[in-house]
Amino acid sequence: MSSINTNASAMTALQTLAATNKSLNVTQGRIATGLRVAEASDNAAYWSIATTMRSDNKALSTVQDSLGLGASKVDTAYTGMNKAIDTLNDIKVKLVAANGASAADKAKIQTEIKALQSQLKAYADGATFSGANYLSVSSDKDAAGAAAAAGTGVQADAKIVSAFNRDASGTASISTIDVKVEGLKLYDSGAGTPANVKNAGILDRQTAIWSSAAAQSAYDSAYAASVAGGGADTAAATAAATAAAAADGTATSIAGVSVANLDITASGVTDAFIGSMLSKVEGALKSMTTAATNLGAAKSRIELQKAFTSSLMDSIDRGVGQLVDADMNKESTRLQALQVQQQLGIQALSIANGNSQSIMSLFRG
């Protein structure tokens, strides 16, 4: 039936053309943005997941920066520690040469030792990166973070942000790589009050040296055991002195000697005491080698975490892409098809509109 009030063919053609134009706009939008899910209205679930993961990836980028900064700090400390070990080995050689030397030669050797001691301090003070120094510190807080009192000051662990985590419930958290600076420090000023430091640095820890090897060995063993058990230097010195006296009741001692201040020309220092100084240097070398090993392990762990974080960021990018990225090959094919459909729709609408003109021919004479 032909009607001048209702053109059903035109209405159908118009609806089809409108649907084609809508699909064409969607496809053109996907091609322009490269995304098939650009807004929450496109796919709420995928959009939510992608938005969260993009946010997490930004956090991981910051983690990667933190790891790079942490690696630089650890590497700086490691370099300083290695140079200090080399210099301490030179002091060791000087002590060996001083054993049995004349007083004049000992004075010359002491001059060299003093220069090396100054160099050790320079290495420790200079091993600073971005304000962080793990070798030359100033412990003014106790383990609880309060102001240090006598024999309580310790150096807090250095924390390097290593990961950004999100559990199954969506709760975010941060992981860190902890560098135990307390076991690395070579010098600890105690914020100007050395008596407040629980355990001094490896090189400025003042202990007693003894005139006999037996007493010195007992002293060193007891001291190390006390410190390892959590004791402060003062308590360790008391326990060690008792052990030394028990090992050799005739041995004498000189108190307050550290690698940083040892002096082979000081009053009362005999070759026996120089031997004990050598033992002290050997102990410091052992502690520094352990510290360098720990720094190397921390550096290795940071590098591994950096590589993992980089791979994780790439993986997240790929995962988000699979959820929201448009398939450009498919969209290109769809665009061409829709453009043809649009042209055909326009043609169909034109034909449908032309049907009304044919009705007028029925009334012409």
Image (tube, rainbow, N blue to C red):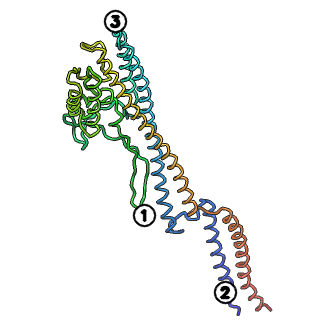
- In the rendered image, which quarter is residue 319 located in? bottom right
**What residue would you read off at disc 3?**
104
Q: Mark 3 or mark 2: which comes first in sequence?
A: 2
| Residue 193 in sight in this render | no
**Which residue is situated farthest in the right direction here?**
365
Q: Amino acid at mark 2?
A: Ala
**What residue would you read off at disc 2?**
8
Location of residue 281 in the rendering, given as x and y in whole percent from the top left corner: 35, 24
Mark 2 Cα-neighbour bin, 10 Å: few <14, some 14–19, many ≥20: few
Q: Amino acid at mark 3?
A: Ala
Label 1 and label 3: CA atoms lie apart by: 74 Å
- In the rendered image, which quarter is residue 32 located in? bottom right
Q: Is residue 167 left or right of residue 140?
A: right
Nearest to viewer (mark 3 / mark 2): 3
Q: Is residue 282 above or below residue 360?
A: above
Q: Mark 2 or mark 1: which comes first in sequence?
A: 2
**What residue would you read off at disc 1?**
168
Q: Nearer the viewer, residue 250 or 10?
A: 250
Location of residue 64 in the rendering, given as x and y in whole percent from the top left corner: 47, 46
